Amino acid sequence: MTTAGGGAARTAMEQAATLVGEAGAIVVSTGAGMSSESGVRTFRGRDGWWRERRAEELATPEALRRDPRLVWEWYAERLLASRELTPHPGYDALVRLEREGGARTTVVTQNVDGLHSRAGSRDVVELHGSLRSASCLDRCGEAPVTIDGELLSELPPRCPCGSLLRPDVVLFGEPLPEDSLRRAFRLAAKCDVMLVVGTSMLVYPAAALPHLALERSVPVVEVNTDATSITRHPGVVHLLGPAGEVLPELLAEAGI
Ligand code: OAD
């Protein structure tokens, strides 16, 4: 399919709009680039987290046990920052797609910032968990607690049983939440268009979802400010640009 850029950009947008306008079931798979225009840092970009910090120092169960204060400070910073943020127009476009488009639309996100739900998307699968709540690191059985200012007033927060609390996000080396993963793969196996927005396509199993679509000859519309490993695949329509601009344009072009 056509890759955007120069004179071909319009053609790619038109192709994508036709696909989205005629689809019966759409999966929108989003990554950190979806949130970047709302002020959330990506992981691997020029200003990404993993340029200054090592994932193993912050986002693993071992790191949490070794230096819980450091790890919690990082998550607290991200959580408090994300509370101040406003979803950009790309989020509103996805809400409109779900409510007013002709297709059953589900957002499957790797993001833990909750911005899709805050924007108004109803059907959201959070593959990497969420920063909203925390649970006992030693799984004592206590119910998860909301992460709020009070919980974060003394770091690291502890479970009533005395063990450390951990944010309910997926840490490196951990399996993804089973229900979310199963649902994401079931939807990816049934959709007739997949939108892939703002992910570097480097972290599995999330990165497997577009491949699952492409193996079934289901078209993939990729929105990204850069190229990824799937950009040149013949089944991919690549819309080069920021999600906050490209998604509203796509919806407008599709007449939604
Ligand atoms: P990355 O930081 O790896 O990739 C972000 C992608 O978004 C890149 O391909 C950018 O080109 C693109 N991008 C940046 N700004 C954009 C914009 N305004 N519009 C569209 N695209 C834009 O983030 P993810 O692929 O989400 O996992 O990373 C996946 C996982 O790696 C994260 O969930 C996290 C991380 O380690 C865990 O913490 C388990």
Image (cartoon, rainbow, N blue to C red):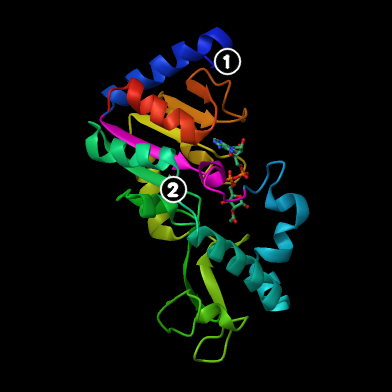
Q: Which of the pair 212/195 is nearer the observer?
A: 195
Q: CA distance from mark 1 to mark 2?
A: 27 Å
1 versus 57 height, above or below: above
Residue 28 within the segment the image draws in magenta: yes
Q: Which residue is disc 1 drawn over?
A: 5
User: Can residue 181 be seen from the camera position used here?
Assistant: no
Kindly give the residue lying farthest to the top in the view shown.
7
Residue 87, label in figure: 2
Q: Which of the pair 151/112 is nearer the observer?
A: 151
Of the four image quadrants, the one with ligand 1 is top right
The residue located at (28%, 27%) in the rendering is: 23
Q: Which of the pair 97/228 is nearer the observer?
A: 97
* Magenta range: 24-41
Amino acid under disc 1: Gly
Secondary structure of residue under mark 2: loop
Q: Is residue 5 left or right of residue 197?
A: right
